[in-house]
Amino acid sequence: MALSGGGAYCGSIGLDAGSGPTAICCAGRRAISRRSWGAFRLHDGGEDQAPDPLIASAQGPGVTPAHRGIAYVVFEDLLLSDYGNRIPSLTFEVEADAGAVTIEAIVGALSEGQMGCVAESQVEGFAASGADLSEAIAPLVEAYGLGLCGDGAQLVGEAGPVVALLDPATRCRRINGRAIDPVERSGAGADSVALALSVRHHDPARDYQAGVQRVTRPGPGRIERGIELPAVLSGAAARSLARQRLDGIWAGRDRMTVRGDWRALELEPGMIVALADAPGLWRIEEREWEAMAVRLALRRLSGTGGRAPGSVSSGQIVRQLDAPHGPTRLMLADLPRLTDGVANGPQLVAAASGGPGWRSAALYALDAGGTAEPIGRTALRAVMGQIDAALPPGSTLLLDMVNSLSVTLLAEDMELVSADGAALAQGRNLCLVGQELVQFGRAVRTGPASYRLEALRRGLRGTEWAMAGQEAGTPFLLIEADRLVDPLAVAGMEGDIGAAMHLLAIGIGDVEPATAEIMIGGAALVPPAPVHLNAAPDGGGWMADRLDPAQPGGMALDQRWRGAIGRGKRAL
């Protein structure tokens, strides 16, 4: 929930007995809803506000309060099944003022008119807090360089107004007959000023979430400084404010002590003055009557604050989509080994997915007796769907530039992207089509959730046997390690060849569990087919050797076919 323009607010959601959810938006009458979730009633917190009829029907007309002075919303017959049987995320924007408010107006409102302020700056909203007025306005004083003037009843910004011009003729040059220097200047080192300054604020472009704008200066230094400003500012305004504050701190290194005659008694700490023989504006930090002279301690101000930087970006919030969870789609596959080395068991993977609101589901393994044992949860939402048209067999040796694969994914927010040769060599864009492993080099979007995949590498990892029978409706799964679960590992099972694996997945949006079953074939244990078979006559038979990709170095000698693969002088 966000508050702009001052005022107070609270945000609580509860369930009244016999009624729908009730959200309390704010204290006061200014409540404006900018988003809608169906049928609801908005009570603006007016002094003539009547009790809500739904709450009154459940609690009784005589005991139901009207909650006057509190704005709240009542939802009636809100179908929670669309949101996983939970109260959805509700966002309200409460506006206390129609437009931007000045710093002067904020100080006046917080002090109930007891304190004035001379500052031209304005914000789109301010959330005041603290035990007293000093704590409430402290962020404004720090961010805008305000100073107390006179008896403490007024704050003055660094832009003025200038109340006096210190004429050299009013300076005191002798005290008790002793000549003195009426002006003394000093300056702090550059490393005493923050090297970087950041302003944390509420950014309307980020739905009033916290934003940070940071500026730096050249030169030496290691100090970084931050300002917590509970005000609503755009990114550009916050960056400009940070630049002005850093310029003010940099200019404030320059200090001056001026001794004047009795006429300087008219000046008070906090006032802004100018000097006829020194550039810039100066703020009176101290005033003291000292040895028949008035000593004024001055600090230089940044004046106009320098040139504001160009436009900036507020960034983008990472917002979780509040959409129905929807049903779960579950896939179970027996994959060949996808990495180097020798497999020591079957490599089964389970992938689950759903619509845009799908998050995860609980996984269960069914034993032979039909008992479901929990084995954990699914991985991240996988990219899956089905092919739209039959895919004819292709070559396992050449890049297939003739055929293409048409795919429709489960949701429009799922994406497939192209990859160059180097990325393909690293294993990118590997997908499972039925039982065939395929890589694609180019992905062309043809519809909201449809793609045409081109530049195909077919039958990878010994799956060329699965090229036949790739008809429309064949399941499609993008292989991504962080979106797959090994059900054998999480269930603590061995996975015997020929045994059946049966999984259930149940998410918060599932009326019935999603199921998947597979017969374990141990594709990861099957060595790749031998290549480069050579045969030579050897007496009464033939000696054959082959290049075996599964062996270290790729070479293995096999003599099982001696005398059985040749007839006469002709190799078979």
Image (cartoon, helix red, strand yellow):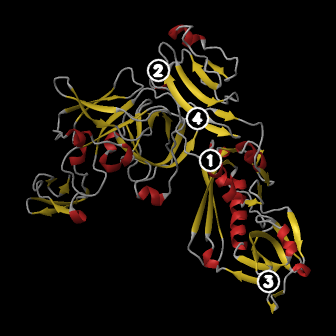
Q: Could you tell me how far apart the alpha carbons at marks 4 and 2 are, in whole angstroms? A: 26 Å
Q: Are marks 2 and 1 in contact (CB under 8 Å)?
A: no
Q: Could you tell me how far apart the alpha carbons at marks 1 and 4 are, in whole angstroms? A: 56 Å
Q: Which residue is mark 4?
A: 448
Q: Are marks 1 and 3 in contact (CB under 8 Å)?
A: no
Q: Of circles 2 and 1, which is in front?
A: 1
Of the image marks 1 and 3, the number of the one nearer the N terminus: 1
Q: Which three-letter amino acid code belongs to the residue tagged 4?
A: Pro
Q: Which three-letter amino acid code belongs to the residue tagged 2?
A: Ser
Q: Are marks 3 and 2 in contact (CB under 8 Å)?
A: no
Q: Of circles 1 and 4, which is in front?
A: 1
- Which residue is situated farthest in the left direction here? 540
Q: Which residue is mark 1?
A: 132
* Numbered mark located on residue 183 in the image: 3
Place of residue 322 in the rendered image (x, y in percent of width and height, measured from the top left): 53, 32
Place of residue 173 in the rendered image (x, y in percent of width and height, measured from the top left): 84, 87
Callout 3 secondary element = strand
Q: Of circles 4 and 2, which is in front?
A: 2
Callout 2 secondary element = helix
Q: Are marks 4 and 3 in contact (CB under 8 Å)?
A: no
Q: Of circles 4 and 3, which is in front?
A: 3
Q: Quadrant of the N terminus?
A: top right
Residue at image coords 21%, 47%: 525
Callout 4 secondary element = loop
Q: Could you tell me how far apart the alpha carbons at marks 2 and 1 are, in whole angstroms? A: 47 Å
Give above or below for 184 relative to 460: below
Q: Which three-letter amino acid code belongs to the residue tagged 1?
A: Asp
Q: Which residue is mark 2?
A: 81
